[in-house]
Structures are given as structure tokens and as C-alpha cells.
Image (cartoon, coloured by chain):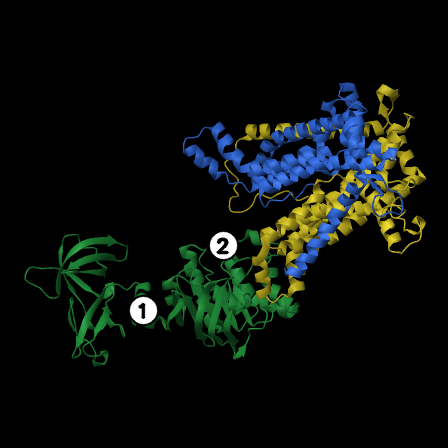
Chain colours: A blue, B yellow, C green
Amino acid sequence: MKTSSRRFFGSIVAAAVGLPFLSLMLWSFAERWFYPALWPQAWGLRAWRYITSTAGLQVMTAIGHSVVVAAVTAAVAVVIAVPAGRALGLYDFKGKDLVSVLLTLPIIVPPLCVAMGLHLWFIRLGLAETYAGVIGVHLTFCLPYAIFVLWGVFANYNPDFEDQARSLGASRTAVMARVMLPMILPGISVAALFAFLLSWSQYLSTLIIGGGRVTTLPVLLFALMGSGDRPVAAAVSLVFVAPAFIALLFSARHLGNRSLAGVR
Amino acid sequence: MTSPRTTGADARTRQGPGAVALSLALLPALAVVLLLFGGGFVLGIVQALGYLPGAGLGEWSLAHFARVLTDPDFLYSFLLTLYIAGASTAIAAGISIPAALGLASLSERSRVIHFVFQMPLTVPHLVIAIAVMFMLAPAGLFSRAAMGAGWIASPADFPLLINDAWGIGIILTYVWKEIPFITLMLLAVLRHTGRDLQDVGRTLKADAWQRFRYITLPIIFPALGAASLIVFAYTFGAFEVPFLLGQTYPMTLPVWAYKHYSDIDLMARPEGIATGIVIALVVMTAVILAQVLTKAARKRGLIA
Amino acid sequence: MGELDLKNLRIDYGARIIIQNFNLAVRNGEMMSLLGPSGAGKTTILKAIAGLLTPTGGDILIDGQSVRDVPPEKRDAVMVFQKPLLFPFMNVAQNIGFGLRMRGQPGREAQRHIGAILALTQLAGLEHRKVHELSGGQQQRVALARALVLKPSVLLLDEPLSNLDANLRQRMRELIQTIQSETRMTMLFVTHDQSEALMISHRVALLLGGRLRQVGEPRELFYQPADPEVARFFGGRNFFKGRVRDGQLHSDLGVFPVGPQNGNGHVRTATIRPEDIRIAPQAAGLSRGLRGRVVKTRFEGSSTRVVVACGANEVIVLTSEDAYRPGQEVAITVPPEKIRLFPGD
């Protein structure tokens, strides 16, 4: 691509991606910003101070809930997805198509429908308004995503390496731990990242199952939007985006050229 | 939906691990899916069909579905949701194709662009919806810029872009999020099959447009189709964005469903669930339709 | 008509010079092999001729017209790659008909051409097969058919047989030869296999060390190599020096009559091919030829390679008799008419 076209392309991408962030940053540092001023009339840290002290506990709790739920969901999803992805990626067997369809459905069907259906049952089981319940409902779609990522990883995986290791004297466990895991580590990172981000951004399913108890960051943010306090909402939005963004930076450095293709 | 195919130099139907080991490997996954997803879905159908022993409704009936489907607002909501999902998907997919081609032709030096392009993937829909609201509201940033440039005289002159009849704000939000999603899926395919087939095309007398139409497009089509389907399914069933940026009437189907579900009147709950089931059925139909069309096209050698 | 002329071709890749001062003329209807070890730049030359690569300097002419500024889509040359690279989503017939569709020639006419090519490449009956259902040899034939059907002036083949196993390679060679003689299409065939080049070509162009060393009929390169490196490439051994005096070559291996045109008083390098040397066990009394002792032998199937120490020299002999053992005393005879003297030194 010519340099001039590259610059043009790059600027469009930068502008399109950066503008929303800019608007959030401006609002989060605004003390007074009335129409039609293009820049805040007064800058300040009120919103940031608010969310770190006055509403600090609320925000911290919400962050805590979000982190716990997303992290556990990601962990469980990966642990289940590795053997499943391996089975699907390496072998052909009767019913494989059926399994594929079964795993596709939870991705296609909106979480709303599942959450509404599960709610009653979870109430009966005492899972409503608990971490476990929310994690459970998140797993319904996070798990299939993780499985598909690892399916792809294993489809390109060469099991000959394992054979080689065994013939050099490694036990089955050693092969899993020292040959397979390192080789699929990038794939595991991507799958975990997916699952984490998917769970992190969930609103309605958390609201329905979690009720008022498990208040994650998106639930808090939604409530804040209702209050009309824009700077605070902007600040919380930025807090909301931060971990995901850091995760992207981390993965970009460590996964090299591999992108987050597939994360929604 | 395209599942990764186990093909290539390392493909083998290996001496399998045996039925037992295979089942053990898949069991946890299938258990979760069948119990949680399957259970949730089935229970939803059951409740929508009126069977709610706890609340004193012990009869099976289609009344809830009937009430939902015959509600005059249903049709408007359905069409609105279809329009928003369809437009978002079409626009995102349409822009993604040249974007993917552009990214594919970028050299290694342009990793920054690649990185920046991925950023929207990490932003939850809720956040970008809020940002869109800040930017496109009648008194938002764009309006102020227009005022400053002298294009408008008051907020009322600024075109209505959010909470509007055409769902422009909603569609823009979806498009912002979904273009990187689709583009990166296309990029993966383009990088994989790349240069060689282009050279073959050129030596076989195909010009640039012909190569795009007859070689590139068929190869990216499965990924394009799969990604678009996911986007359509998501945008059709999403709640947050239309709730924040949509009109109060008509509302999209998911918003409608939740409104009923969370209504104080407990009797409205099954109707909310029934609406949810309808949403799920629409999405599943779309998937089946896509599968059928893909199979047919594949048979005719139109796509990979 | 398909005359190909490469004039002073130069191709750089960044700071590296891949090809320079390359001049070659391929005649109409000729099958020429571009022979040389891997990595010598042969594929690069083909790509330049096909238009997939822009040369840094020099010119390429097809039928007397320069095609330097003509894009590959419009050039009357088609390239067949090392890997079949068939379009995975099309079946055999659609793959073959691709170029015709691109040129805007679909329809009955095209169907006839495709049918003819299918017969020519022995693919009849496989029209509707999907690409992944084909064997390696079948795929390569489809790739060939796909190019042939366009009836280009020049067909460029980039080692199309390297990925096939030995038997298949032989059958494909014969097929390509048959097709070439039937269609009289000008073909430039790149290979690193010297016996393949000798087998199928009208002429061979040998590329060694980045330079074109010799261009000529197979027999010429084999029996009259231009220099020792060329000889060595075709399996020549036994290089020795000698001084020419009065029409005779005086060397360690003996005195041999050589023609008067080889200069007088000069030292020349000569070679004799291993299979041309006659070897016999030294029978007591009979001492015709040079004496020597077998150093080692290597059984190679239809022939045995025997290394013989003759005085200070080592001579390599190829014989069909597996009758020699290390340490054995033998007598070798060098027929003077088989000695090849290299021009100059």
C-alpha cells in the first residue's frame, strides 16, 4: 500500500476509534460544560474524586464483582474448553456435527432469552442473586466461544510433537504439561480473554440473575446514566474500559502478531 | 456456521482415544451447554406455554404467545428490530471487506494501525453507546461543533440522531463495534490464502476486479457469512444499546421483552419470556437459512 | 507463434542481485529447460516472463514485441506453479475454464476446448470432481490443463513435477512431452533435475552460479560441456590436465591423440566420463591399459562405481559389472575419442 494511502487509512481508523474515547475523557474531567461550548468551561477532578471516595465503595465493589465473575467464568470456560477443543480439533467422530450445532446455539441465541428462562430455576436452586448463578449464566455463551477458539487452535496443532516427547520418555502428564500446554498457550490466552471480556460486558443477564445483589460495573454504570451526572458516568465508563484495554496491550505484546480476531 | 475444519498436512483421523476418553473430554462442555443453555431455553418455553406451578399457573396454553403475537405493537417492534439488525450487519459487513483488503496489504511496519483497529473489540457496547450519546445528542459534541462552525443556530436544528425513528445512533454504535470484529475474521482468511492465488489469477488473465469477484470474495465468503450471522444475531437480541439510544416507542423486541418481564404485574412475565422465545426463534431461523444458502452456493462452486 | 527473447535481463531484490546479464532466446514450438540448482533464480526468471515480477533492467520480448509494460493479465504467457494452487471452491471443469471465463469466452466454444484439454491431459470423466477429492498427480494435471486451455504463446512451468513421487513424475514427463509435440506450444520448463532436462527438452539452458553457462541440445551439454562445472553438473568426473604437443595430449593418464585444433604447447584440462572408461581385472601378463588398484566400490543398482588409484591419480569408473573389490588390481583403458578437451583454461 502506498505511503499516502496508508497515512489516510491510518488517520481514518485513528479518528473513528479515538473520537468516542476523547468525548468520554473530556466529560470525565469537566466541572462545568454547558451548551454550546466545545470545550469544558471549567476543568476539574470532581467526577474522579467522586468515584474514588464518596461513591468509592460502590465503585470498588462493582469492580470487584465484575472481576471475580469474569475471571472465574474465564477460568472455568478454559478448563472445560481445552479437552473439548482438543477432542473436536484432533479427531473426527460420529456426532461431531451435532456437537458443533449444539455449541453454536448458545452463541446465536441472545443471553436475554436464556436468562429469563433460567431465572425461575435458579431461584428454586438458590442460585439467584449469587456469584455462582451469574457465573453460570455467563458460562452458557462464554464456554462455546472458548471452545471454538481452542477447536481452531487444535485443528492446526501437530500431535506428532506429543508422540515425539513420549518416545523420548515423557509420561502422559509431562507431555500435557510440558509439550501441549506451552504450545497452545497463545490460544488459551485468547480464549480466556474472550470469555473474560464477554462476561465483563454483560448487563442484562447479570441484572436478571444477579438481581440487586451481584452488582457488576455495567449494572452500576447503567444506573448512573439514569442519574444524569455525565462526568461521573464518563469516568465510570473509562474505568469500565480500562481492564479490557490493558488486556489487549498485554496480549498484543505477548501474542505477537496474533490479533483478537473474534472478540465481540 | 463454519467450524474450523481439521484439514491440511497434519490432518488425520488418528487412532482415536476411544469412545470413553472422547466422551470424558466432551462431557463437561456438553453438560454445561445442555443443562444451562438447554435447560434455560426449555424452561423458558415451558413458562411461556403457561406452565408455572409456583405462581399458580398449572395449565399449558398458547395464550401468552397469542397475546404477544397479536399485540399491534409487536409487529412494529419486530420490524424495527429487523431493520436495525439488518442495516447494522449490512453496513458493517460492507465496510469490513475493503477494510480487510486494506489491512491485508499493509506491511509489517503498520502494526500500530492493526493494534488501534482492534481497540473497539475491548470496549463494551454500553460504553460506546454512552460515548455516542455524548457525541450525537442534540446538545452533544457534534452539535456544539456545528454551532461553532455556524452550520446551525440552535440545538433544535441539529439532526435527530439518537432516540430517533431511524435508529441512527444505535446503528452507528453497532457499526463501530462490529466492523473490527468482521474485518479481523476476514483478515485471518486473507492472510492464510494470500498471494499465491492472486498470482494464479493474474497469470490466468483475471484483472483486479475479476480477481476480487471470482477469487477473493468466494474465499472470504464463509468467514464473512459466519461473522455477519453472529453480528445479526447479536444486534437482533441486544438490549443495552436500543434501551439507551432508542425511542421510547416503538421499542426493539428485546427491550419490549424485558419491559414485560420486569413488569410489576407478574402476569406479564410469561409474555416477556414468550417474546424472548420468539427472538430466539427468529435468530435460529436466520442461521438455518444461512446454512441452506451456503450449502447451495458451495455446491455451485460459488464460494469456498 | 511463440518466440521468447530475454535481453540483458536483470532482477534485483532489495540490495541483492538475483539475475543479471541474462540473455536467452527460446524458439517457436520449442521445449526448453531452464536447468540449475535450487535457489539459482530460475523461478524469479519465470515470474518476470509471466509478468508477476518487474525486472530491474533488460527486456522481455514475445514474438518480437516487448512485453515489459504489459501486465500479466494481458500477456500471452501463462505460468504453472510448483504447487497446483487449484481454486478450492471450484470443481475440475470450473478450474480449467477459469481463464476462458476471464477472457469472456464462456459458452459452447469454451466447453469444447475444455473437453479437448481434459482428453489431452487424461482427465476425462473427472470434470465434476471437487479439488480436494483429487490425487496429487491429478491436481497437477488440472493445473496444467488450466494453463494449456488458454493456448498461450509461451507456457512457463515452474518445476511442476517436484512434489510428485518418482513413478508419477516419469508418467507426467511423458505426458508433458506428448502434449508439447502435439500442440507445438513453446514451453520453458524449470527444473533442478538434470536427467529430467535431458529427457524432455529440445534444448537445455544451464544456469550455474547466477550465470547462463551453456545453451544447447541435451547431447551437446552432455558430451561437449562448455567447462568443467557444466561437466560436473551432468555427472562428469575424472578431470585431468595435460600438455598438447603436436596433436597429442601428454598427461598422467597417458598420451592421447587429439585433433590439431587444440593449440600447441598449451596446458589443457580434459575429462573422461566414468562410464566411458573400460575396466578389467588385471590378468597376469596382459597389461593393456593403465594399471591401478581398486580403492573402493559402490553398488548403485544398474551400475557400480569403482574408484581406482592409478599412480598419483584417482580415476572414477562406472561399470555394469559388479565384479570388483577393494584392493583388487585392475587395468583401465581410456578411449581417446571419448576424451573431452575444454577450450581455453
Q: Residue at x 87, y 34 (%)?
A: A226
Can you give x and y, in whole percent of width and height, for residue C307 in the image? 20, 57
> What residue is disc 1 on?
C222
Q: Amino acid at mark 1?
A: Phe
Q: Amino acid at mark 2?
A: Gly
Residue A142 visible in this rendered orientation of the protein: yes
> What residue is disc 2 on?
C136
A232 with respect to C228 (left or right): right
Tell me if label 2 and label 1 are in contact, CB under 8 Å: no
The secondary element bearing badge 2 is classed as helix
Q: Nearer the viewer, mark 2 or mark 1?
A: 1
Question: Against B304, is C249 above or below?
Answer: below
Numbered-mark total:
2
C82 with respect to B267 (left or right): left
Chain bearing tag 1 is C
Chain bearing tag 2 is C
Can you give x and y, in whole percent of width and height, for residue C254 in the image? 14, 69
Question: Which of the 4 image quadrants contains residue B42?
Answer: top right
Residue placed most toward the observer, A224 or C188: A224
Question: Against B192, is C143 above or below?
Answer: below
Question: Against A69, is C18 above or below?
Answer: below
Residue B302 visible in this rendered orientation of the protein: no
